Amino acid sequence: MAQELTVEIVRNPSSGYTIPPPRAGQAVGGGVHRDLRVLLRHADRDGLTITTYASWLPPREQWLNARLETAPQTLLDRAGTLRSEWKRLVVDHTNGTPGPGMRVGGRPLSEQADLTHHATLVETVVKSLADEGFDVLDVMLDGRGSSLGRLREFLLGALAEEKDLRISFDSDLPMPWPMLAVDPSVGIDPWDAFLGHRHQVEQTSSGYDWVDQAKVSPRLRAVTSLNTDSTLDKVGRASDVRDLLAARSELTVRTEAKDLLEALGNEFLLEDLMYFWCHGKFLEEGTRNRRLVIKLSDPDLIDGAKVTRRRRRLRGGQQRFKPFVLLNACHTGQAATDLHVGHLGAALIDLGADGVLGPQIEIPQIFASEYAYSFLDLYLEGRHTAGEISQALVKRFSEKFHNPLALTYSLHCGLHSRLNLAS
């Protein structure tokens, strides 16, 4: 007579061969993203080393290392030229032969987010910018050394042949990574040549301080802030962004620097997301001192040093400052154009921020407000990481609106940042 046995599983020897449950970072369609890490380090005053780590390769092939033969300043100069070309060809493009309803001298690629009516012009511009973006990458990896040749062959091949990599550029040099491109002359669609279109991309650094972050209780709604210049309240979709934050989070609105700095001085700043909608610019203060500042509604200027000073006294004890930061102000995704520029985003990450997203160039306000609404709408769902969203928006704006400007938004850390109200 058959007898039913009761079985209790006390060990799982096949755990390494079972399929894990879905998690953040799982690629659309069920596959898992491949991770690529690129380390760019100062070897000495005039040189750089580059190291690549490819998680999907066999252990003996995962690491490659070489010394770059291109000087750091040359790369910074090339990056500056690339940013300038984006501004010249897109933001500052003027309309010399306007059609019906267009004005002479207008800036047609800056005055609206939907550039469908200018698709032919945009295609020409995108092809030129893809060539410029590849030139920066090509110059970076140029050289005759055997180790560099092997690394170049692998890296350029991986960037061009793979899709949807998660790439961390752990770099001593601040570069506009999403705006760099693989070679479009080998038959790759110029839009798809850009690293920010093909992959999830972030710049990070191993040098950021570790912060002892206090745990927070699970909550039903995100805690957010809008730090804004009130003169921008009616620009583009600014009011829609404010309504979105108010409807889907516990929102604090700040319009003056003193209120922001006071909040940053709190030991426990429990915001999940900080949104900045304001002006940003570089101040020239001597030949070797150039700093990035932002301004809210009042005349006071805010920079990385001022923010750091507010929280410096809190170091050493447990605290809470772990927001994802969307710095929607001109240049705030740009860490530097030379080796002497401080960066507000880097200061926020150093203090504990989970990631910072901002534009590399002077961004048109109409587009900036549209981008912010799209990003925040997805991020507040809590289902996608900032890396996934930033890549998705590059594709959305290019395919739906023929607008390449989403590529100018760069992540500093934050590739894996996701709204998690249970944390």
Image (cartoon, helix red, strand yellow):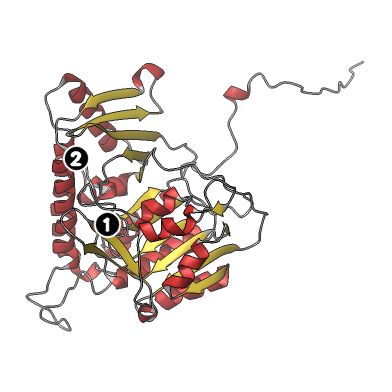
Residue 419, percent from left and from top:
54, 54
Q: Which residue is mark 2?
A: 137
- Viewer can see residue 174: yes
* Identity, as a three-letter code, of the amino acid under mark 1: Gln
Query: What percent of the width, then of the height, locates residue 55?
Result: 41, 28
Q: Residue furthest toward the front?
A: 313
Residue that badge 1 annotates: 360
Q: Is residue 7 left or right of residue 71?
A: right
Q: Which quarter shows the N terminus?
A: top right
In the image as oriented, which residue stretches furthest toward the left?
96
Residue 6: image location, x then y, percent? 86, 23
Q: Secondary structure at mark 2?
A: helix
* Residue projecting furthest to the right: 1
Q: Could you tell whether 1 is left or right of 378 in the image?
A: right
Q: Is residue 340 above or below residue 15?
A: below
Q: Residue at x 52, y 65 (%)?
A: 263
Looking at the image, is 254 positioned above or below residue 422? below
Q: Amino acid at mark 2?
A: Leu
- 88 or 370, which is in the foreground? 88
Q: For mark 1, give the secondary structure.
A: loop
Work out whether residue 388 can be spotted.
no
202 displayed left or right of 215: left
Q: Quadrant of residue 93?
A: bottom left
Of the pair 95 and 251, the residue shown nearer to us: 251
Which is nearer the eye, 148 or 72? 72
| Front-lying residue, 31 or 37 | 37
- Identify which residue is drawn at 24% across, 51% down: 191
Q: Earlier in the sequence, mark 1 or mark 2?
A: 2
Label 1–label 2 contact, CB within 8 A: no
